Amino acid sequence: MLFSVKSKAFFIDYSEHAILVARTSSATAPMVVEDIRECAPDDEAALAEILKSLQIKKSQSGYLHATCGVYTNKRVVRKVTLEPKRVKESGYLNEVAQQQVRIEPEQYTLAVLNASDGAEYDTSKATVKEAVFCGMPSEQINKTQDRLLSAGVYSERIEIGTASTVGALVDYLAFAKIKTPTLMLEIDADTAHSFIVSAAGMETSRQIPHGLDSIVPVVQKELGLKDEESARKLFFSNTFDFTGMGPVLIKKLVKELQSSIGFYEVQTGQSIGQVICTLLPPKLGWLESAIAGQLGVSVLKVDLPAWLQSRQITLSDSLPAHAQDVRRLGLFSLMVQYSSHVAAPEKK
């Protein structure tokens, strides 16, 4: 029995909308996802209770050791175009970070990955033009680690949740044999992170300066409310049906998305087939359908259990039905190890 207790593993998906914590039967597949808990990101007491209830046996350090996916507000997951002949030049990658990603690279901890498979970009060979810069400010990494430690979590590995989620979506599209590209959106308070993803990898990336906060003034205006705080409370509550005015609320965001999609379609000749919003709080789930409707595409329906099973990850029968919600994709992405796929039946 002691051996099985020791082999338990923990995964935490930590965003500004929610903290998701999972316990699995082992750290690597084959594994069973035994339990998933959720709390608000600012509810320290609830998180402490979750960690206490999930941890069958206290570690010697007193901390729960976990693999963590985080979504800091200055995270970078951006596709770039490189000049292979210049990659070995001193300072060239910093130049790309400044000019294409528009960040100060000395303030960031960055990795350069292949856009197709997420593997580390081989600068010694440098034959591929398309790459992805992933990272976040070093200061935010330190603060995140401190926040996790103060909550009783020792992070054995910290990943940018956005990057692992994109990887999971690429893998899912290949598994499900979905041929058309998918628009993946992460909508934060002040920005939206937009990606066009296919089974071949990340096609495009863009950060849009319209997040959930930019919708609040529109809510105030449309409903004639006296102040933004009243509009904010109503918008983030579940007491008012906003679906009817959805197109008005997301007008600016949709305009930016249409611009990105239009450019991609002209460049490639391919049309976006579906959209997926991976980070929305449950009360704002209607936004996904509203965005899809305005873009004239469908919402991607993800069969999480089938995909996970293909990666030798099984969901326990004791898990509630909402454990299969697409908002868990980032959490599950931390568990998956990629290799060649046994494909699912052909999608019609």
Image (cartoon, rainbow, N blue to C red):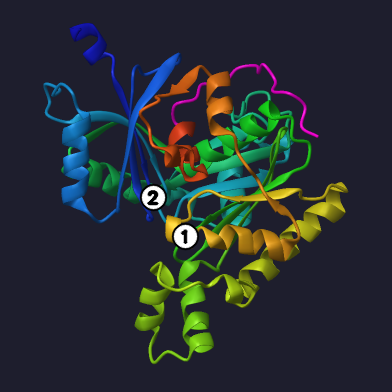
Q: Amino acid at mark 1?
A: Asp
Q: Is residue 187 magenta?
A: no
Q: Is residue 9 left or right of residue 174?
A: left
N-terminal of the two: label 1 or label 2?
2
Q: How many marks?
A: 2
In reply to whether residue 345 is colored magenta, the answer given is yes
> Is the residue 21 above or below the residue 294 in the image?
above
What x and y, as percent, mark residue 87? 65, 36
Which three-letter amino acid code belongs to the residue tagged 2? Ser
Q: Using the rendered view, name the quadrant where residue 98 is placed.
A: bottom right
Q: Quadrant of residue 174?
A: top right
**Secondary structure category for the residue under label 1:** loop
Report whether residue 50 is seen: yes
Other-residue count near label 1 (Cα within 10 Å), few / some / many at <14 / 14–19 / ≥20: many
From which residue to which does the magenta span run? 334-348
- Give left or right: position of 36 versus 81: left
Answer with left or right where residue 129 lies relative to residue 326.
right
Nearer to me, 117 or 20: 20
Quadrant the N terminus occupies: top left
Nearest the viewer among 165 and 37 is 37
> Tags 1 and 2 in contact by the CB under 8 Å rule?
no
The rendered magenta stretch, by its main secondary structure, is classed as loop
On residue 188, the disc is 1
Q: Name the residue located 53 percent from the left edge and 73 percent from the top edge.
A: 242
Q: Which residue is mark 2?
A: 15
Question: For the point 51% across and 16% down, which residue is it?
Answer: 312
Q: Quadrant of the C terminus?
A: top right
Percent of width and height locating residue 328: 46, 40
**Which secondary structure lies at badge 2?**
loop
Which quarter of the picture shows residue 266? Answer: bottom right
